[in-house]
Amino acid sequence: HDDEAYDHDKYFKVYQPQESDQHYFCGAETDEECSITDDEPVDMDTKVWWRLSSGRVLGVMNGMLLEYDSSTLAPLGLVLYPEELLGKVITVVDSGIEECVVDEDQPEGMEGAECADESYQEREQAVIVHDPETNKITIVQPNE
């Protein structure tokens, strides 16, 4: 028999990323600057996700910026509402602090030796949300 509480169209649905899907945008975890939305404003159909150098996973779905669990990729929570994100572009940039940058001038076989320090875990990054119409910039701060 039918159950009114089982009406799937009324449930909140969210995309769960998969490592091999076409919506994965690589680069934010390795590049100094990464235009996540390719300078295209976010709309309700934008579907993209990425990893930061910290291992945190963010994604855009239904006009919202969401955080996902870094190991299971299950949705954890809402970062920005559609009202805060629609029509804007997302870029991830490094802070410019060069705590651990690979020196290509090192002797062969020693590239990256300066990054072997166990205390180095991630690069300092910022998620920038830019409104091309007003030129307003919002920096998304991570929760600790």
Image (cartoon, grey):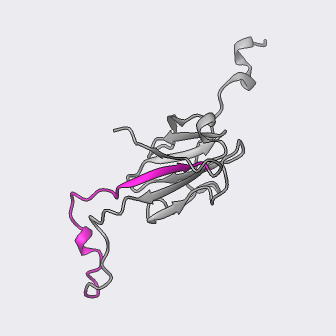
**Residue at 59% over, 57% down:** 20
Residue 77: x percent and y percent?
A: 50, 33
Rendered position, 60 above or below 30: above
The quadrant of the rendering that contains the C terminus is: top left
Dominant SS of magenta comes to loop
Q: Is residue 108 magenta?
A: yes
Residue 118: x percent and y percent?
A: 21, 60
Q: Residue furthest right?
A: 1
**Residue at 50% over, 51% down:** 128
**Numbered range of the magenta stretch:** 107-131
Please tell me which residue lies in front, 72 or 60. Answer: 60
Q: Within the image, what quadrant is residue 85 found in?
A: top right
Please tell me which residue lies in front, 47 or 4. Answer: 47
Judge from the rendering whether residue 121 lies leftward or rightward of residue 41; answer left or right. left
**Residue at 29% over, 74% down:** 112
Residue 27: x percent and y percent?
A: 50, 63
Judge from the rendering whether residue 92 lies leftward or rightward of residue 115; answer left or right. right
Q: Residue furthest front?
A: 134
Judge from the rendering whether residue 127 lies leftward or rightward of residue 25; answer left or right. left
**Residue at 59% over, 37% down:** 84
Rendered position, 62 above or below 38: above
Residue 108: x percent and y percent?
A: 29, 87
Judge from the rendering whether residue 79 lies leftward or rightward of residue 6; answer left or right. left
Rendered position, 64 above or below 91: above
Q: Is residue 46 magenta?
A: no
The quadrant of the rendering that contains the N terminus is: top right
Count of numbered circles on the image: 0
